[in-house]
Image (cartoon, rainbow, N blue to C red):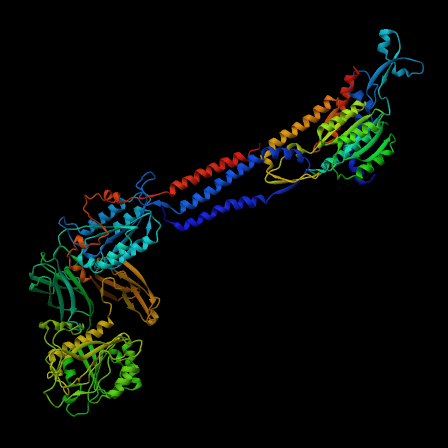
Amino acid sequence: MDAQQAELLDAEAISRAEALGLHARYVVEGYMSGEHKSPYRGFAVEFAQHREYSHGDDTRHIDWKVEARTDRLFVKQYEQETNYVANILLDGSESMMYASGALSKLQYGKMAAAVLSYIILAQRDAVALGIFDEDMTDYAPRSDSRASLHNIMARLASFDGTQETDIAATLHNMALQTPRKGIFIIISDFFDEEEEVMESIQHLRFVGHEVIVFHTLDPYELEFPFNGLVEFDGLENVPKILTRPAEIRQTYQREFDAFQSRIREGCEKNGVHYVQVDTSKSLAQILSNYLSFRMRTAKGKQH
Amino acid sequence: MSFLNSIMLAGLAAVAVPIIIHLLNRRKFKTVTWAAMKFVKLSVDQNQRRMRIEDLILLLIRCAMVALLALALARPALKDSSTDVLGQAKVTGIVILDNSYSMELEGMDKKIVFEKARSAAKSTVNALPSGSAVGVLLASDIVQGVIDEPTYDLNQAHEVLDRARVSHHATDMLPAVQEAIKILDGRAALRKEIYVITDGQASGWQRNSSEINQLIQDHKNDIDVYVLRVGEREPVSNLAITGMDVSSGLTPVNHPLRFEVEVANHHTDAMEEVTVDLFVDDAASPVDQVTLPSVPAGGTATVPLFARLDKEGFHSIRAAFRDPQHADALAADNQNRLVVRAVKEVRVLVVDGDTEPADPRDHESFFLQLALSPVADHYVQVDVKTPAELSQTSLDRYAAVILANVPRFSADHLAAMENYLRNGGGVIFYPGDQVEVEHYNQVLFEKHGLLPSPFGVREGDPSQDEHYLEFQKRGYEHPVTAPWNNPEFGSLGSGRTFCWLPLEEKAPQSDVKEAGLPNVVLRYEKRNDAEEEGTLGGPALMERSWGNGRVYQFSSTADTEWTDFPIRAASVVPLVYRMIGNIQARKDAGLNLRVGEPFRQVLAAHQSNSEGVVIEPGMVGTNNITAEPDVLDGQPVLKFEDTHQAGIYEFQIKGDAGRIKFAVQQDQRESDLRLISDKDLPADAKLVHWDPNTDFEATVQQARVGAEYWLLLFLGVLALAALETFLAQKFSQSK
């Protein structure tokens, strides 16, 4: 693993995420001390239905509570049990190149993708990585081999965003091309046609995928802290704009908040986990927050 | 609407500055590569129109500020506006205070006119609206700009007026009016006023009245002139001592000296029984007194007074009226002063060119010697030498050198003579039959510029006594001969000249730098046998200054060979004494000065770093003066210029025990106190008969129209600046 790849694996993030993912059981036990042990592992948390016990079923999955009530043996079934596929889709369009500090959104996204891949592979689940702009630019097909981590890192490291985005088209394609239910983790700033994007997310949901949105934003995009006369040079072939940003900051923030809200609400409406990623914040913190949130919601669903 | 400072209107061009800054600022921006363009565009679209309008508003305000500032600096004014909304417009005024010595006249109330004039001057200053500027000029025939750059500090003007003193100059208002107009011309002011405070003495106003009228008329559109007349309305009579002279010529110690004192009567009636006292130095009692039986109305009378000086050195001689009724209301001209230097002996060298004859009475110098030094221990000591002895003689110990019938001079002689003259000596040339006329004319006149005139071709015949010339009997113009204008002094005209070398009054002069212009001292009358007998003819005696000395040139002999004048001792002695006295006076030049004339003391070259002290009359002040190189001949000179008060001054070189006295005499013209009539005062000036009850402010108020608007514009600029700050702040708030 060369330096460029190593950069993507935020050691701190991995160590903390692993604490939640790779050693999930162990950690979950820690979270839920005093309660019964979670039988679930990793991301595969979707409970599907009960089925009458038949010979050969793993006795671990017998629902003893039901047996106690009905005297009959049922086993619990899960949507995806093990070896689910996590499709990590990273927006590699030019707008992701923006960086107010040292780290661009794309680099941050790459780090997030790398960390997530590592965690997921470490749990022996499968990961597929797609980097897209107008189209799927780079795709690492699903693999549950830890060895494929190297491949994923290499792809991430060698990628440079240069193009305009078409998130919607990419997601539609993915929805069509991925028949097996899985998890879609979309890392993007969503600077695209919002409605189309939401439609494509809906599409993914419709075909039964779980979708997690990592809405990656630069702190400057949130705060718009410029002063004086500034010429904004668009990253995606947009004409330049000369203005005094201080005088339009409130309008900008209002519009930007509205945009964020629309994305968030669209996600929530479709049962999509929405995570706002501020590239100035610690990646480890964001991932650990999200994973703990995910644990909590999974637990809720279980009940 | 006019602009008082219209050059500032060019500042309107500065309106372009905010626009240029605005445009330049639009070129100065940061470039940010940006992803969320959609939102920037949305925000800009919502705000662009507003921001453009705000920019435009701020730009217009800034341009308006610059424009208003330029207009305010250009000082717009309405000449005929009588509004007082903005406060009375400021005035730039010049107070011309007449301080000629007629202002010292005592009024009925026993106060001198100048005190009234001072009050009048202060009332003009008090009448100025606040924020006005005022200059003060003290005017006589010279202008003393005590505040020649108008000041806004009116207290300073009061202080200056409090300190102002009467000078002993005569009145002439022209220089002061010219100066005041020059000062005001250089000022940007809406209202310019000149206040001339004067007693209205006719002699002072009439001297240049047409020029003054013209000046005031030329400026009547922008400068208001007020003439404030102070003093009595009626012309005042006055008796004055207008002249004083030592008619004895020489001033030896312990000899009676004759002083001619001139008394002028400016009354309309003859004055009788006028007693004049003569005082020496600071003595309280007079040394001589003479009562003039009558001084005619408007005329003068000359009175001789005698004094004896008991020791060598400088003496001040003062002539004054005795009787209080003659010591009239104008004190300054009731006395006059003179400084003389008393000497123990006067040595005269006579170089005799004709000592051949065995009988000394035939020597050229015989009569001269007799006339100059009649007795053995006389204060005039005469040494007679031959031309051959001249080379071995040091000239500097002689008060005068008389060269009688000397044939010619060697280069050494001439060099010695020039040196002697440079140091203030006096040389008197007499012609005679030995004289080589060509040599005199070419060398002495043309080359060295020593003689005042070339000698002409000999006229007359000494061997006959029918045809002759006589000296003029009246109309003496030269100071040396002036006493003979008084018949009591005797007569010069009785001598007869049978042969002479004519002198030329207007001979073309050589360009010798040290030679002064020639003057005629004494003339002949026309020949006794000519048709116009008795009228004035050619010069008999001429003089010129040469270096610091003086040269006299007779046209006839020192002995009786050509003329019988030398035997007329009553005429010859005073004439030659006065000539020698005149030489001395030139040496002591500057002991008797007219008021305002600078005192100059020529020093030796090694004294160039000397400092001097001058004590003014009445010990009112001492002044330190420092030597400065003379412009003329590079000799160091101590100079004292502040001689505006008449009286006796004392001068001392620091570290030197000797004191020099010098007298400053008042200007005689000022003694005539007749007043100018109101109608003869400048027609374009506003006349105010000022007395302490005059409300001058009310008088000028009516005339002070006009308003300036710069303050209003300036307030506008301030308001715009405040608005600009507020709006810029408000506009830059985030929206």
Q: Quadrant of residue B140?
A: bottom left
In the image as oriented, which residue stretches furthest toward the top?
Answer: A70
| Residue B728 shows in this picture | yes
B630 or B537: nearer the viewer: B537
In the rendered image, the quadrant that contains the C terminus of chain A is top right
Q: Position of residue B368 (x, y in %)?
A: 16, 83
Residue B191, placed above or below residue B588: above
Say which residue appears at 58% left-offset and 43% top-offset. B26
Direction from residue A65 to residue B657 in the image, left or right: left
Q: Position of residue B349 (x, y in %)?
A: 22, 81
A261 or A114: nearer the viewer: A261
In the rendered image, the quadrant that contains the N terminus of chain A is top right
What is the tally of numbered marks visible in this picture?
0
Q: Position of residue A259 (x, y in %)?
A: 67, 28
Q: Quadrant of residue B205?
A: bottom left
Direction from residue B138 to residue A40 in the image, left or right: right
Say which residue appears at 27% left-offset and 60% top-offset. B642
Q: Position of residue B406 (x, y in %)?
A: 23, 87
Residue A116, placed above or below residue B291: above
A57 or A29: nearer the viewer: A57
Say which residue appears at 8% left-offset and 63% top-offset. B295
In the image as oriented, which residue stretches furthest toward the right?
Answer: A55
| Residue B377 shows in this picture | no
Residue A172, placed above or below residue B590: above
